[in-house]
């Protein structure tokens, strides 16, 4: 789009003719090959960076990086041509970004994705449909509804008749796409809130009249949400946003396997039910806790919820795709009894950022969040924006639909089984090394452990509370330091988090956390990560009195 | 990823070795050229479709399309190779999608985008950073903060010192990205709510304790939001979600130019202020109404809000980028006095779907929506997820940052000025044709008009209310039919909406709505669209007694 002024090549000027050219699909071979060359630059220029680095090194510390990005004036004239922008992104940005695709990057739920995902995302961008309404998406909305039925079926396993009735039904809604898992959880609790505080004679419903009027109409002072202490922080955020108050998230203790303690759960519910001024908005089961990867006893929870008639939401943002593995789907048994389920595409469906989804067992539940407007999404239309927290939406459903066709559920199963089985091998490796202590064994593909030298481990068993507290403080310092030093070295990355050990009066312990979803992450690589941690420890802490 | 079984080419099986290959960046030339060939297929295969059709034809009606997408079983084995998936998308999906890039598609706020946007989006997908935290984005979060400061400066025009202090400040927040404009509006009102009902002695704040406790603590029964009747439906949705109640959106009348009636606004505010059991959450100014493109008198509104100490939010999802045009930015005068501003990237920044943004004049306002977790976004870190409605986020900021470098604000200004000036020419053209009536003249680049044959137009002026109602009913029927028939013919697309004509006891009239943002949409094309509407009208309605 830039005028090429040969006499003064540095001066770029915006002009109409070149601007127009950026909107025209190229007709001649020369223009086409230029466009393709840019794509080549993108696909392979990032190559070197992606092959060698984890990227979160301190070579160029954040603070220094900050100094480089402080100009806050928008340029009136073009600064750069597309080719130069791409070069800058490859040479100046990518090296200081994080190589989440590295098999040594096992710290977070963001990982490598198959190369074809980039192609699929490119198609979605080129089509640029807006799924809020049929008039800007047409068949793409139809495909989205079909895909939603497929994922709903994966979760809820209803009958063929059920899906035949609902798959392209303009009136009913099996689920919705939304930016991410946080907003999927918000959507689930929004629907549950509106269902619970629905319209009745003399009251127009909480969506119309608000929380204050709703509590009056239903004669309550408070709504609570019950979930294990391992819940994602989005649950609190959802309750804050929805006007419930994030203090009203009741965090129930876990059992020794980091699953919600069923006895404690029932106790909380029955206590609340004695107080008829407090309502229960939802009980939430976790299918793949962010910190430990553990899965709550969903079936038991569903039974309790059904008995007390409480909305049962399952946060399967992480663990949901495990349902595609015949070998491990039993871990999520009971999810089919949930009222709503969150599941993320950019996690274990290996999609690019971002794709949140929420599904409802009952296809009428989302009716409580209907919105219309004059110019679009009119009543009775099949516009997907009628029941959705967001308005304009990217057609990421095309990416997931295509990926499922290319991989098959069996392809996904192989990835998921690799993660779980490698995590178990890794746990064995940690157990076999004297310097380490496995803190939470993997149920899915996440585990936590810590550095805990034998003398300290022995002391911890023998000693009294106060002294244990002191030892753990020292261990916390060690683990935090080793994690940081390893990250700064830039070869590999595990994350750290703080867990509460023991059920009550538990000590806070800092642990190292590994998420194993990259199929290139082998047990050999994980051994190298432990080796490096040992090296860091022995060179930094050996002299200490431990 | 698929095993190539020559003897049985139809049977695809997922296996580990080929699966792994989809995660490896190709090293040899053959593999690289295959990847590139797919991109070629994507970039140019869509070409034919994009050149010829608007796409929302009834050639294949929605209902029929629905019948084709009803299989709801996920395949265990791969169904298709990437090349076939791409072919299917190009040959079987794209022709039934909507060609929003056509210059004849002037019905919605989704339009053509410059080709380089697709390249930029591809880079973002290939890097796959998650901007929720530094550990999965590093420099990309730094670039995002810089870009936010640039857009903040475009809107609020604070001093160089101000931006130097905040551009890379980990403690303060100038704004946030979010999926779309709806969620940007939700974010703005979420922050305003938490600011208004903030913690005080004996009360932990609305975010912690919820709406019911907050109203008690602040001695109110109700919060309202005041906005003109032309507000986007997301305002009601936001108040529903946030627990305020969507009935508590007070829609104020417009003046003859479709701007909020300032007298009516002041009257509402002063009446509410007399009732000390009702609080005002926010007054919202519209900068580019979805239906008419009109802009409220932002400066006057800001002054009133400042006098009454009310949060002033501006929904500039559509009109915000007009600030880049020196010629027309005055239309948005006063936006710099807003407390918060919504602005969309996928609208007049010509980005692919989707990119919502919200900015706050005061860099501490977002402190009221802080959330932390143990494993990421720890207190004190510069993680962007600390103050954000969403969690995981795509780095769309890289697309906008790069686009601004390639286009310059001057490039954007040319596009915006073309839209506004072409809309004015179009208005003249409509005025000059006897069959049409201009209903809302363009202020920015949106206008509405309707078919209104001269005899009926004359009658409307002379006649009494009851008869006018009847004539308008007939006109509504005509306009709805012509719009539908034109859409179904598949050559061009204008949308329709329902406006209330006259300030009180107004009749509902159906109008045709044109949004002119595609630089390829010339006055000549718009004349053709009118010609086609005339043709449809004269062939379908001439025989009627009008």
Image (spheres, coloured by chain):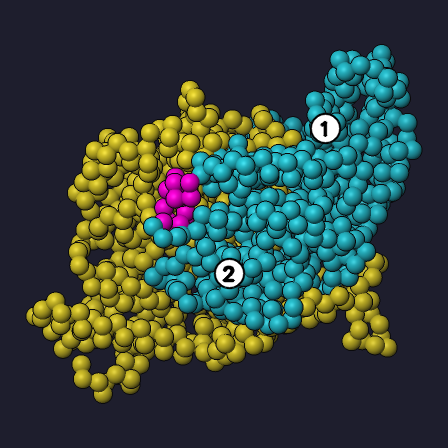
Chain colours: A yellow, B cyan
In magenta segment, residue B208: yes
Q: Residue furthest bottom?
A: A543
Q: Magenta stretch?
A: B203-219
Q: Chain of mark 1?
A: B
Looking at the rendered structure, the secondary structure element under dot 2 is loop
The x, y position of residue B205, in whole percent, is 40, 50
Q: Residue at x 31, y 81 (%)?
A: A536
Mark before the other along the chain sequence, 1 or 2: 2
Q: Nearer the viewer, residue B186 or A184?
A: B186
The x, y position of residue B23, in whole percent, is 47, 61
Is disc 1 in contact with disc 2, using a CB cutoff of under 8 Å?
A: no
Residue A52 shows in the view: no
Q: Chain of mark 2?
A: B
The x, y position of residue A311, in whole percent, is 33, 35
In terms of secondary structure, what is the magenta stretch mainly? Answer: helix
The x, y position of residue B402, in whole percent, is 65, 64
| Residue ID for mark 2 | B364
- Left or right relative to A4: residue A392: left
- Left or right relative to A330: residue A84: right
In magenta segment, residue A136: no
Residue A336 position (above or below residue A36) = above
Residue B47 position (above or below residue B383) = above
Residue A35 position (above or below residue A351) = below
């Amino acid at each position: 789009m830039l005028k090429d002024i040969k006499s003064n090549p540095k001066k770029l000027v915006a002009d109409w003719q070149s601007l127009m050219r950026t909107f025209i699909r190229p007709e001649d071979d020369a223009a086409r090959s230029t466009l393709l060359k840019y794509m080549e630059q993108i696909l392979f220029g990032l190559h070197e960076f992606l092959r060698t680095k984890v990227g979160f090194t301190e070579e160029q510390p954040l603070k220094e990086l900050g100094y480089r990005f402080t100009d806050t004036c928008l340029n009136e004239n073009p600064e750069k041509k597309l080719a130069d922008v791409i070069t800058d992104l490859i040479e100046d940005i990518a090296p200081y970004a994080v190589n989440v695709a590295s098999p040594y990057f096992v710290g977070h739920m963001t990982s490598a994705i198959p190369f074809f995902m980039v192609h699929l995302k490119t198609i979605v961008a080129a089509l640029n449909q807006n799924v809020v309404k049929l008039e800007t998406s047409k068949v793409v909305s139809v495909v989205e509804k079909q895909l939603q039925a497929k994922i709903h079926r994966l979760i809820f396993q209803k009958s063929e008749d059920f899906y035949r009735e609902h798959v392209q039904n303009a009136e009913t809604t099996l689920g919705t796409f939304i930016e991410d898992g946080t907003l999927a959880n918000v959507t689930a609790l929004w629907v549950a809130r509106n269902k619970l505080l629905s319209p009745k004679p003399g009251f127009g419903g909480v969506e119309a009249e608000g929380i204050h009027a709703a509590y009056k109409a239903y004669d309550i002072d408070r709504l609570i949400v019950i979930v294990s202490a391992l819940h994602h922080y989005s649950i609190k955020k959802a309750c804050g946003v929805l006007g419930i108050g994030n203090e009203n998230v009741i965090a129930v203790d876990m059992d020794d396997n980091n699953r919600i303690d069923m006895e404690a759960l029932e106790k909380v519910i029955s206590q609340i039910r004695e107080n008829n001024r407090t309502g229960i908005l939802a009980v939430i089961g976790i299918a793949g806790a962010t910190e430990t990867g553990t899965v709550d006893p969903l079936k038991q929870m569903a039974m309790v919820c059904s008995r007390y008639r409480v909305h049962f939401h399952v946060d399967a943002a992480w663990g949901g795709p495990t349902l595609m593995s015949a070998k491990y789907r039993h871990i999520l048994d009971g999810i089919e009894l949930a009222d709503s389920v969150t599941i993320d595409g950019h996690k274990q469906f290996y999609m690019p950022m971002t794709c949140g989804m929420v599904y409802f067992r009952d296809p009428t539940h989302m009716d409580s969040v209907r919105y219309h407007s004059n110019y679009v999404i009119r009543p009775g239309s099949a516009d997907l924006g009628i029941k959705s927290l967001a308005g304009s939406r990217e057609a990421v459903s095309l990416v997931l639909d295509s990926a499922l066709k290319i991989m098959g559920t069996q392809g996904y199963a192989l990835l998921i089984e690799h993660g779980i089985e490698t995590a178990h091998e890794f746990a064995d490796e940690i157990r076999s090394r004297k310097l380490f202590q496995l803190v939470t064994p993997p149920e899915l593909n996440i585990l936590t452990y810590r550095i805990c030298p034998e003398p300290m481990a022995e002391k911890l068993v023998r000693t009294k509370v106060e002294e244990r507290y002191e030892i753990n403080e020292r261990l916390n310092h060690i683990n935090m330091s080793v994690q940081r030093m390893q990250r700064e070295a830039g070869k590999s990355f595990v994350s750290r988090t703080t867990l509460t050990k023991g059920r009550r009066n538990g000590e806070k312990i800092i642990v190292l956390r590994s998420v194993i979803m990259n199929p290139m992450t082998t047990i050999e690589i994980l051994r190298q990560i432990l080796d490096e941690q040992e090296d860091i420890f022995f060179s930094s802490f050996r002299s200490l009195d431990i």
